[in-house]
């Protein structure tokens, strides 16, 4: 059972690493086809909730269009009761503006892939 939890923790780490590298294909390989994702911070995206791999691609595209650079860096991670909670540092930059902060994201899994990403209670 610990090996499954370890795989989930590693998958979340790889997801955020791929985001910061700009590797959408790698991100999509880690999520379930029916993934549900809440926008990292509502004001940075046009929708609150995105669905499916197309939804992940939409969040990624919105950030790429609206910001010169966006990084989501994993700062801490823990697994409890089949939920992996990641503390993520968000840094978004564009000419004359920077947004930075930490968010906690709770990730659930289905068949070894990330099934949901939603804001957790604390960062």
Image: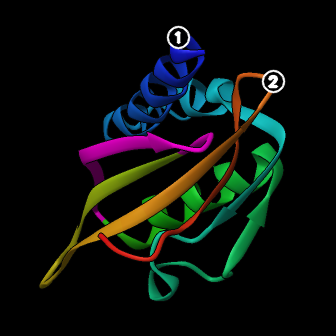
> In the image, is 112 to the left or to the right of 104?
right
Residue 22 placement: quadrant: top left
Closer to viewer: mark 1 or mark 2: 1
Instruction: Identify the residue at the far left of this view.
Output: 96
> In the image, is 94 to the left or to the right of 61?
left
Q: Residue at x 12, y 85 (%)?
A: 96
The residue pinned by badge 1 equals 3
Q: Residues within 10 Å of mark 2 (few under 14, many from 20)?
A: few
Above/below status of 56 relative to 99 = above
Above/below status of 17 relative to 68 = above
The image shows residue 89 at horizontal and vertical percentages of 23, 60
Quadrant of the drawing holding the C terminus:
bottom left
Magenta span of residues: 68-83
Q: Secondary structure at mark 2?
A: loop
Q: Residue at x 34, y 69 (%)?
A: 103
Numbered tag placed on residue 13 in the rendering: none
> In the image, is 102 to the left or to the right of 48?
left
The residue pinned by badge 2 equals 111
Residue 70 visible at all = no
Was residue 92 drawn as part of the magenta stretch in this picture? no
The image shows residue 18 at horizontal and vertical percentages of 41, 32
Q: Residue at x 82, y 49 (%)?
A: 52
Q: How is the image coloured?
A: rainbow
Residue 4 placement: quadrant: top right
Instruction: Identify the residue at the far right of this view.
Output: 34
Q: Residue at x 43, y 23 (%)?
A: 10
Question: Sequence-wise, which precedes: disc 1 or disc 2?
Answer: 1
The image shows residue 87 at horizontal and vertical percentages of 30, 56
Q: Main secondary structure of the magenta part?
A: strand
């Amino acid at each position: 059972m610990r090996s499954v939890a370890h795989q989930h923790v590693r998958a979340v780490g790889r997801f955020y690493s791929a985001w910061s590298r700009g590797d959408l294909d790698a991100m999509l390989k880690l999520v379930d086809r029916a993934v549900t994702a809440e926008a990292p911070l509502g004001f940075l995206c046009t929708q609150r909730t995105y669905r499916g791999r197309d939804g992940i691609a939409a969040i990624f595209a919105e950030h790429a269009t609206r910001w010169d650079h966006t990084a989501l860096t994993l700062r801490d991670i823990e697994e409890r009761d089949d939920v992996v909670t990641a503390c993520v540092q968000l840094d978004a930059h564009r000419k004359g503006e920077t947004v930075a902060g930490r968010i906690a994201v709770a990730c659930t899994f289905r068949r070894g892939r990330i099934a949901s990403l939603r804001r957790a209670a604390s960062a």
